[in-house]
Image (spheres, rainbow, N blue to C red):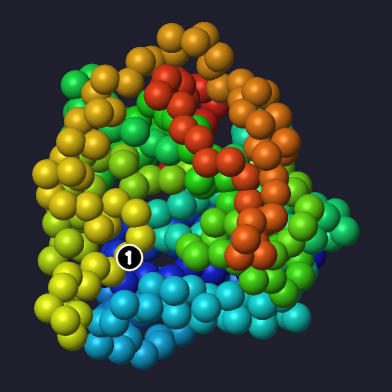
Amino acid sequence: MAVAFVTMVYDDAFFLDIWVKYYSRFTDRRNLYVITHGPQDYAHDIAAGCNIVEVNRRAPYRAMDSDRFQLVNHFCSGLNFMFDWVVYNDVDELLVLDPEVGPDPVAHIAGLDPRLEVVSALGVEVIHRVDLESDYDPRRPILSQRKHMRINAWYCKPCITSIPLRWGPDGHGSEHGTYNLSDDLYLFHLKWFDQKFHTDRHADRLAMRGTNADGSDLVFGAGSWGWSKFEYQRISNDYLRFTIEKKGKGFDFTEERKRLKESFVQGKTGFYSTDWFVDGDLRILPERFVGLF
């Protein structure tokens, strides 16, 4: 079974390096596809041996992000005619197989029943507790330095498909009407893994603001990229108030898995998705995951 992995980058050298090094441990780089939104010279060095697809980047406009993801939808759907499974994730997201199940996420995906058609992974975010953990050291794996995780249903994405598929914006939800949540695959979202890094990254994204014809602000990207500097810092500081293992659940997400499956429904736009929820009680990463990337 052939599996392709796809991501898209713009000014994301740091995460692209992690993405390529992680997946190339399990599959040939010829199965990795990196779409660059405009010229991204660093990608040719970091992703040497991968398939690099450079697409035009227009002058900023309001629908830029939604149009960008329409391209991703069509590109991945095309690959479905040549691969048994296609996986798309943002460059700061990695699919990880529970080490209790096996060492190779690509082999695991290749062995999925194709009749499932679309498979979701459980989304967990890596949180930097700056009061308890040091700044990121690039000489060491992230999961050797960060142990605080939270579930975020927004990242329980239907990111693995054996059929041409239309995802919702940024891959949150899809047009597929069956919810198949893997018991073994986790989507690790790395955005918040280091406070200094993600604060600087937000400042860079915020500087991309433009102006509409009527003089109003034109903000690019979804979610937190559009927050003001003050709002972003306030939300970041909230992580310091999260409890840690107060509920005593450890890495058991049985209740959350049940909620995801029961809340799966088709929305007004025609896309199927689940409830969005997060947990303010951080979980400690089990030792078996330490050092995986």
* Residue 21 appears left or right of 213: right
**Where is 287 relative to 141, above or below?**
above
Residue at 35% x, 39% y is: 142
Q: Nearer the viewer, residue 256 or 80?
A: 256
Please provide percent x and percent y for residue 243. Answer: 35, 15
Please provide percent x and percent y for residue 112. Answer: 80, 52
* Residue 158 appears left or right of 211: right
**Where is 287 relative to 277, above or below?**
above
Q: Find disc 1 in the rendering and name its residue.
A: 221
Residue at 25% x, 82% y is: 60
What quarter of the picture does the C terminus occupy? top left
Q: Nearer the viewer, residue 180 or 134?
A: 180
Please provide percent x and percent y for residue 176. Answer: 74, 61
Crowd around label 1: few <14 · some 14–19 · many ≥20 (10 Å): some
How many marks can you see? 1
* Residue 36 appears left or right of 292: left
**Where is 118 relative to 120, above or below?**
below
Q: Is residue 290 visible?
A: no
Q: Amino acid at mark 1?
A: Gly
Q: Nearer the viewer, residue 114 or 239?
A: 239
Residue at 69% x, 71% y is: 165
Please provide percent x and percent y for residue 2. Answer: 73, 68
* Dot 1: element: loop
Residue at 67% x, 82% y is: 78
* Residue 69 appears left or right of 265: left
Q: Nearer the viewer, residue 14 or 264?
A: 264
Q: Is residue 31 visible?
A: yes
What quarter of the picture does the N terminus occupy? bottom right
